[in-house]
Image: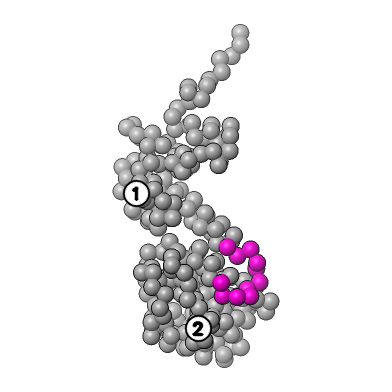
Amino acid sequence: MQAHKHSIKDWAIDDRPREKLLSKSPEALSDSELLAILINNGTKDKTAVDLAKEVLHLGKNNLSELGKLSVKELMKIKGIGEAKAITITAALELGRRRQAANALEKTVIKESGEIANYLKALLKDHNHEVFAVVFLNRANKINHFEIISRGGITGTVADPRTILKKALEENAVSIILCHNHPSGSLKPSRADEELTKKIKEAAKYFDIKVLDHIIVSEDGYYSFADEGIL
């Protein structure tokens, strides 16, 4: 007797996006279907696809906006527990890192625009100000990227000693400073300029060159080097 073959209609609703991905391709799925796969299963009242649509709605139906939501914000949706929220956040972070890597196909930094696009992709979804440093080797290739502090830019949170210690650990011969302006404004503050000067002067004692300080926002970037104020 021939075994009965189940059609996609016989699958549980939560499993249909997975079957669609297997039978077609990831590109064939909608954003909500891809999210449903991450969510894995629904609740008594909602399917995984229903939950996915609510998650997208919370992110204004925009993946870029969705990437700005925290685990706690995602958990405001009934049916999205901590595990589901963490899975979504992790997936969006991987996407962000992939975008950043694509933005810097050339590993040798030759101009501010190249590194600015890389930094924009990494920092654009932060709702608060973060201060980061790119550490480069003699060939101007990126050795390491690290967020040094979060929540503001002052001499205490972006301590030159912390930055230079890390530069020595990474065998960096030059560094690029960076922070974001979530407000969108690209104009550097007096504190930005003073901190840049402080780090530049301290770096000289270790033969480490500060190549640039770049401010990024969704509107673009500002390069201290390009503006001649480094």
Amino acid on which the number 2 mark rests in the picture: Glu
Q: Nearer the viewer, residue 33 or 187?
A: 187
Q: CA distance from mark 2 to mark 1?
A: 39 Å
Q: Residue at x 50, y 64 (%)?
A: 122
Tell me the chief SS of the magenta region.
loop
How far across and how far down the image is residue 61, in percent?
39, 48
How far across and how far down the image is residue 58, in percent?
34, 49
Disc 1 crowd rating (10 Å Cα; few below 14, some 14-19, many 20+) is some
> In the image, is residue 109 part of the stretch drawn in magenta?
yes
Disc 2 crowd rating (10 Å Cα; few below 14, some 14-19, many 20+) is few
Q: Which residues are magenta?
A: 103-113
Amino acid on which the number 1 mark rests in the picture: Leu
| Residue 171 horizontal side relative to residue 158, left or right | right
How far across and how far down the image is residue 188, in percent?
41, 80
The residue under label 2 is: 227
Mark 2 vs mark 1: which is more N-terminal? 1
When the figure is inspected, residue 137 is found, relative to residue 71, above or below; the finding is below
Where disc 1 sits, the SS reads helix
When the figure is inspected, residue 176 is found, relative to residue 202, above or below; the finding is above
The numbered disc on residue 58 is: 1
Corner quadrant of residue 159: bottom left
Where disc 2 sits, the SS reads loop
Q: Residue at x 33, y 31 (%)?
A: 44
Q: Residue at x 53, y 81 (%)?
A: 226
* Residue 91 can be seen in this image: yes
When the figure is inspected, residue 71 is found, relative to residue 12, above or below; the finding is below
